[in-house]
Image: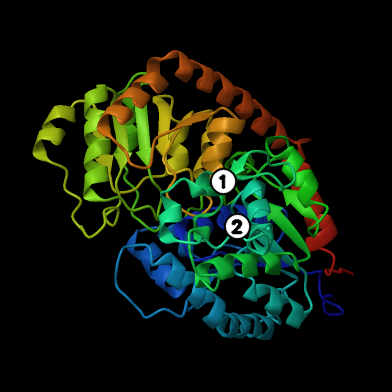
Amino acid sequence: MGCHEGRKPQKPHAVCIPFPSQGHINPMLKISILLHSKGFHITFVNSEYNHKRLLKSKATSSLEKFKNFIFETIPDGLPPIDADATQHIPSLCFSTKENCLAPFRELLIKITNSSDDDDVPPVTCIIFDGIMTFALLAAQEIGVPSVSFRTTNACSFMCNKYLPLLIQKGILPLKDESDITNGYLDTVIDFIPSMKNLRLREFPSQIRTTNINDKLLNFIMGETEGASKASAIIFHTFDSLEFNVLSDLSLICPPLYTIGPLQLLTDQLPENSLKFLRANLWKEDEDCVQWLNSKEERSVVYLNFGSITVLTKDQLMEFAWGLANSKKNFFWVIRSDAVVGDDSVILPSEFVQETKERGFISRWCCQEQVLKHVSIGAFLTHCGWNSVMESIGTGVPMICWPFFADQHINCRYVCCEWGIGVEIAKNVKRDEVEKIVREMMDGDKGQKVKKKVSEWKILAEEATGAKGSSSLNLDKLVKDVLLSNHLVN
């Protein structure tokens, strides 16, 4: 798209639309901030529900009108609710696919109609979440490049690419519900390039169905295939972390750009950039850093199971008493909606009394700030990909308790391939929690993991340095893809 004759050259304009959940909004916001620093006008598209939550969480700075960075909203298609909680993810997947194209089109028309205003240049590219491929259709309709941003890692995407072959070979769907518990999930899959000795249980949890027409399984396969029609794909990773699988993916996908860890790239932006922008859907605890300041270096276990994971009351108790019995300092984020069927999430008074000198519990926090803190010695995590990348970027070893989706493959690579974490069994028991926490903080295994994650941190810093692969890939993406339709006089 060119600029009007006689007018000054206009900025390129990227419309960025994340899947409407916390773990997808955060990395898309960072990509947007990086592009803004490269001279792009940004329109960032949240759902109406999340927009209201941002207002409620007091993240108002994220909604102000900044120069060339505008927040817009579209409905997600689900019935309106007034809650401070993550929406039902499968319902959100189906609803965005079925209902979001029309309002997104309308938003693009609105932007186009306002592009006579010098402050709003015409849209020149669309960056869409990897499971929001309806946006690819909208990009095709207005004739601009579309880029799929995968907030998972390359290994997870490769697994998704091969799901149709697993079905073709009769490995999926499961023959019976008992296959989930009878050892069938330990079947080794040995035909996926660069991924050896992979077990079925490490594939996305959506495969755990007996129905070949399962909506979620078919959603994952459809969105994976749809992303392959984009002009390019961004992965939030770095070359040396997933080199082999990235090499094989590059043979069967559009151009791939590894850009990560994102927090290391945005941290390097100048102070007059928008790197301070955050979009946390829960109100951040402002007292936790002061508490962390009072603790010795590497003495605190940080627990956060992300924005979606839910625990049973029994699991909550096992984690709680495992922590208490470990006698270690801990900072635990427990969302208000973190326990199945319990909005109050009340821990027993005996636990509170036992841990009052060494425990701090909060509803939400700025995780990047916490992981950077010198008092943090280990991270007990659900193994969401953002958390893994933030852990690598800060050199913090992980204790992994994967919950669903891509978290199982993340856990496999964290623990078995990269050597930067250890896994806790799904059927969590307090004795195991106590043992692993102590081992990670004080034991020989913990020392090995700490050494390994320190090595990966150095590689992550190299990738995000001025001449590093992630920095160069960002520049290449801008030049070769995002500006390919943008002509200036």
Question: Looking at the rendering, in which quadrant would you find the N terminus?
Answer: bottom right
Residue 354 position in % (x across, y down): 14, 28
Q: Please give the name of the residue rendered at 27% of the width and 28% of the height, measured from the top-left corner.
A: 431
Q: Residue furthest right?
A: 489
Residue position for label 2:
171
Residue 226 position in % (x across, y down): 69, 69
Find numbered disc 2 in the image and state the secondary structure of the residue it sits on: loop
Residue 268, numbered circle: none
Question: Looking at the rendering, in which quadrant would you find the C terminus?
Answer: bottom right
Is the Cβ of the residue at disc 2 closer than 8 Å to that at disc 1?
yes
200 vs 302: above or below: below
Q: Please give the name of the residue rendered at 68% of the width and 42% of the height, measured from the top-left corner.
A: 195
**Real-space CA distance between mark 2 and mark 1, rounded to the nearest whole angstrom:** 9 Å
Residue position for label 1:
187
What residue type is disc 2 on?
Ile
Q: Please give the name of the residue rendered at 50% of the width and 30% of the height, measured from the top-left corner.
A: 421
Describe residue 245's horizontal placement relative to residue 108 as left or right: right
What residue type is disc 1 on?
Thr
Q: Please give the name of the residue rendered at 46% of the width and 13% of the height, measured from the top-left corner.
A: 444
Residue 371 position in % (x across, y down): 45, 34
The answer to whether residue 68 is visible is no
Describe residue 430's horizontal placement relative to residue 245 as left or right: left
Quadrant position of residue 43:
bottom right
Classify mark 1: residues with Cα within 10 Å, few (<14), some (14-19) or many (20+). few
34 vs 1: above or below: above
